[in-house]
Amino acid sequence: MKSRLIAFALIAAMFVALFSPMMLDDSDALENTDYKIDVRTSGQPASEYEATIANGHSKSWVVSVMNNSDKELEVTYTLAPYNSNLDVKMDGDWELGHHLYPYGSSKQYLVEDKITISADSLSESYDGLKVVLTLTIWESGDIASAVSQDITITINIASIYDAAGEYNKFLGIFVNDLPEPFNDSVVPAILTVLFWMVISQILCRLIAPRLAKILDSHTTDDDAEKFKKAITWLITVLVLMVSFIQGLDIYGASAEIKASVISFTSIITIAITLVIAWKVYLLIVEGILARLEDNEDSPFDLTLMPLMNMIGKIIFWVVGLATILGALGVDLGGILISAGVVSLGITMGAQNVLSQFFSGIVILTTRPFKKGDFLKINDKIYIVKKVKIMFTEFLGWDRDMVITMPNNAVTSATIINLTKDDEAYRLYIYFTVAYKSDLKKVEEIMLNVANSSPVVLHDYHAKPNVRLTNFLGSGLELRLGVTVKDFDGNITAASSLRMAVYQSFLENGIEVPYNRVEVDMLQDIFKGARRPGDTVED
């Protein structure tokens, strides 16, 4: 009995001697109230986080550690090995760890580190990949107090290159059970592409004519055949590209091959789609504007076509480039930020250029004049040749020179459009007759000349009239008002009417006065005698 007691006593002594250091360590370890670990993400359990990431995409979590105690703590991170299709990065010098001062200290007692996990751009689909980040925290100078906590992140990769069970299946559905050598995966791949091409032609015959008819209703010309051809091309290209990619899945092509083909086909599809869409856009816009132009009350007409052309080019270029860059995996966010900074610099440094640009937009939108109009700008006559987005080209009245004027200078000037609503021009010619003239007869002569002149319009426009406009020192001023064909020929018309009126005045004895000087020769000067009161010596 004693021997048994002694044996138990020895075993107990050995047990206490063996495990007492560990018990001491546990008693000295940090408590979970001495620190706080937080991972900022939404809708996930506190101890495990999960995310689904597509090829080439990433997701981030922010890990924060706060010292809640009056001790100084050390924090280090350790990443366990992870799947090669993942790329894990943490910001800053996380491998060196952090030193945390007591809570409430003026020094750092809270640290934050961001962990970013990216999926390989050519990865296949995976479920349940684990990324384990271990945080080790201990009191400064006392490694025995160290405690560890794992943060486990579960990643699912949703690959766009996953065949999804389509390998060696017709249309990706029916298993290829054909005998050799037709049981090879290339057979269902080729037949699937051919099948979808036949379907595309059927769709073209059924859909293209109907869509073309709908689009043609917005144009003035019979453009149905053009629309039909464009829609047929678009359907054929889209179906070919999609079926070819499915054929690669059925064939079992590698992710590298599929990635290259998808990038290439995406660019080709986008380019062809934009070209076809551009042609359709021009046909529709031109047709709509032509229809509106027939309505007299409509403010829109074909003069807006250059503006719509420019706006369309800007939109199509921006959308096209953005779509192509996105298809190539380029981050558009950084480009947009850079573009914003560059735009700000351009705005500050090229205000005059921007003023010209927006003035051109105003002119093309409000259309205060059009090609061929005669304008009076700063008392000079110009003929509109072409309105462009940055400047307007004018011809001189004699058409012997081309004047280029910035659009901001045009919009800031007072413009008199001499031919805006009607090319006919109201011409006023002034004549002077002697005070003793018979005004009734003068008026009759002037009206007879105007009414019989071929340069004067004798239609619904205002009839010729005569007005007494002024009393001059040499005679009476009268104004003959007539309407001529256009402003361009008003000088020739005025000359013709002046000559005809003057000739008629001469024939009817109407005096046209002119400035004259009368000199009275005093008689005594010729006699050589002095005038009375003349005291000037000879």
Image: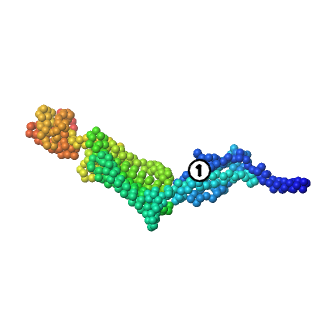
The structure residue drawn at horizontal position 45% and vertical position 57%, both measured from the top left corner, is 174
Q: Pick out the residue farthest to the right.
A: 2
Identity of the amino acid at label 1? Glu
390 on left or right of 126: left
Q: Position of residue 361 (x, y in %)?
A: 36, 46
- Residue 245 appears anywhere in the view: no
Q: Position of residue 114 (x, y in %)?
A: 60, 51
Quarter of the view holding residue 87: bottom right
Colour treatment of the image: rainbow
Depth check: 29 or 465 in front? Answer: 29
Mark 1, secondary structure of its residue: strand
Q: Position of residue 191 (x, y in %)?
A: 41, 61
Depth check: 456 or 47 in front? Answer: 47
* Residue position for label 1: 50
Q: Position of residue 149 (x, y in %)?
A: 68, 51
Quarter of the view holding residue 463: top left
